[in-house]
Amino acid sequence: MLREDIKYITDLVAKTYSAQNKNKVSKHVKKMLEMRAWVIHSVLTAIRMILMLFSLTSWQRSLHNRDTTIHNTELINNITYIIQLSIIVTTIIGFVLDIACCKYIKIAHVLIYVEIVYTCLIAMVPYEAGLGASQTVLIMSTFSALCLYCDPIPNFAFMILLVIWLAFFQIPLVWD
C-alpha cells in the first residue's frame, strides 16, 4: 500500500513538472501553487504589519532589551538601526507585492525570496532567550518560506543555501 502511494505521488510530481507535459493539469497545479503562496504570504505580512505597528514583534523587543543577552555587542550596536529599517522595508515590499499579486499572480514566484531576505534579517537579532530562541525563530521563518515555493527545484536549492549560510556564518557572527 505504501509503495503504491509513493509511486503515485512521484509519478504525479514527475508528470506535473516534466518538460513534455505542458497540458492544463500542469498549468492548473502551478496556478494553485502561486495562489497558495500569495494567500500564505498575505496573511504573514498582515500579521507582521499589525504587530510592528504596536511594537509587539519579538525582534523589536529583543533589539530594545539586548543588554540582557550575550552576543557580539559591537556588531549589533553598530547595525541595530540598519536591521530595523531593513526589516520594515522588506515587510513593506512584501505588502506591495501581495497587492500586485491580485492583478499579476505570477509575481507570487518572488514572494519566497522576499521571505528568505526577511529570515536573513531577523537572524541578525539577538533574542532575549538566547541562541535557542534565535534558532527557533529561524526554523519557523524557514518553514514559512518553504510554504511559499512555486518552482520546487530552484526554490529548494536556494533554501539549502540559506540554511547553510545561517547555520555556519550568520548565527555564529551574531552570537560570537
Image (cartoon, helix red, strand yellow):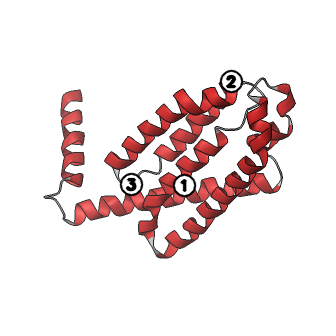
Is residue 135 among what the camera can see?
A: no
The three-letter code of the residue at mark 2 reads Asp
SS of the residue under disc 2:
loop
Q: Is residue 7 left or right of residue 66?
A: left
What residue is disc 3 on?
A: 150
Residue most extreme to the left? 20
What residue is disc 1 on?
A: 114
Q: In this view, does 3 lie to the left or right of 74?
A: left
User: Which is in the foreground here, disc 2 or disc 3?
Assistant: 2
What residue is disc 2 on?
A: 176
User: Which is in the foreground here, disc 1 or disc 2?
Assistant: 2
Q: Check the picture and name the quadrant holding the N terminus.
A: top left
Residue depicted at x 41% and y 67%: 106
Residue 118 image offset from top left, x and y in percent: 60, 48
Q: Name the foreground residue: 11 vs 53.
A: 53
* In the image, residue 34 above or below residue 159: below
Separation (CA) of disc 2 from disc 3: 36 Å
Residue depicted at x 48% and y 52%: 112
Neighbor class of circle 1 (other Cα within 10 Å; few <14, some 14-19, many 20+) is: some
